[in-house]
Image (tube, rainbow, N blue to C red):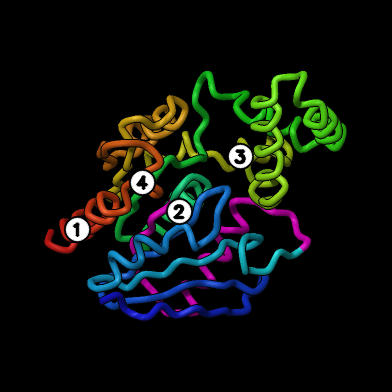
């Protein structure tokens, strides 16, 4: 039987943070992806709570956490996480991060290496990979008002244009508008600032166990980001699982991989 899930809030220097918490044992902190919040992790919390202490916050600017009018950066999210864990007196934790959450998790581990037991990453952002430099160009355009107006006009004429393509772009635009903080962190700030927070030159110092989980049918850009982490972090390993969209389709397999990773570290 699943243990009861507790929802909580705490006021930090940067703003109020909401989180979900359940279970006892080794502490695992789950950091959600770019286009999500802590509810993304509910299937894993249910599967791991019998043996682990699981904590899943909404990052600052996401979900039910406060969305202050500040300049967002990876450094700000790391500082917020550090203060949160310090307030809860959690000295040593495992971090599990997806997408943007993976970037924040790895950045936190690099800054507070002695506070992290290990990392599990799924499709982590935060590294510069040759050939992927323009991957956010379309997202920047879709955020523009004039582009949204044009797409809505085309959608009104959907019987005589490429309906599915326009509908897909409108859905992408809606997602971007629903997660303004993710947009600011990933592409809506100065490129020099973004590059300064990327990790390709720092991962060599990430001297702790890192497990990168990859779906067999993940998109090629995700696989290239995964491979960059595996090649650059000295103790990183890649584990491939069936399917794609692992959190949506393979929660049992992901939970088992995390369970095995934590178990190996605890034993040895």
Q: How many other residues sit within 10 Å of disc 3, few (<14), some (14-19) or many (≥20)?
A: few
Residue 7 versus residue 198 in the image, above or below = below
Residue underneath mark 4: 249
Q: Are marks 1 and 3 in contact (CB under 8 Å)?
A: no
Q: Earlier in the sequence, mark 1 or mark 4?
A: 4
For marks 4 and 2, give the one nearer the viewer.
4
Q: Which residues are magenta?
A: 69-97
> What is the number of the mark on residue 105?
2
Q: Secondary structure at mark 3?
A: helix
Give the numbered dot on residue 265: 1
Looking at marks 1 and 3 on the same chain, the residue that comes earlier in the sequence is marked by 3
For discs 3 and 4, the disc positioned in front in the rendered view: 4
Say which residue label 3 marks.
Answer: 196
> Is label 1 or label 4 in front?
4
Q: Residue 246: image x %, image y %?
A: 36, 44
- Which residue is drawn at the image coordinates 62% and 23% (left, top)? 134
- Which quarter of the figure is the N terminus placed in? bottom left
């Amino acid at each position: 039987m699943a243990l009861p899930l507790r929802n909580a809030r705490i006021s930090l220097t940067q703003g109020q943070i909401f989180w979900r918490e359940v279970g006892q044992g080794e502490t695992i902190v789950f950091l959600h992806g770019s286009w999500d919040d802590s509810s993304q992790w509910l299937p894993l919390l249910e599967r791991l709570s019998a043996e682990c202490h699981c904590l899943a916050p909404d990052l600052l600017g996401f979900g039910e956490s406060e969305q202050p009018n500040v300049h967002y950066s990876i450094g700000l999210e790391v500082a917020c996480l550090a203060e949160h864990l310090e307030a809860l007196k959690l000295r040593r934790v495992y971090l599990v991060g997806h997408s943007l959450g993976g970037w924040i998790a790895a950045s936190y581990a690099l800054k507070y290496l002695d506070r992290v037991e290990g990392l599990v990453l799924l499709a982590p952002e935060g590294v510069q990979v040759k050939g992927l430099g323009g991957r956010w160009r379309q997202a920047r355009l879709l955020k523009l008002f004039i582009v949204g107006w044009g797409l809505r006009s085309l959608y009104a004429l959907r019987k005589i244009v490429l309906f599915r393509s326009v509908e897909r772009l409108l859905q992408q635009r809606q997602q971007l508008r629903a997660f303004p903080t993710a947009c600011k962190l990933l592409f809506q700030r100065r490129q020099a600032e973004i590059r300064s927070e990327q990790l390709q030159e720092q991962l060599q110092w990430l001297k702790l166990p890192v497990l990168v989980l990859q779906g067999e049918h993940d998109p090629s850009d995700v696989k290239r980001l995964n491979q960059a982490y595996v090649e650059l972090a000295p103790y990183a390993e890649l584990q491939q699982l069936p399917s794609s969209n692992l959190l949506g389709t393979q929660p049992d397999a992901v939970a088992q991989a995390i369970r095995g990773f934590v178990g190996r570290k605890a034993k040895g």
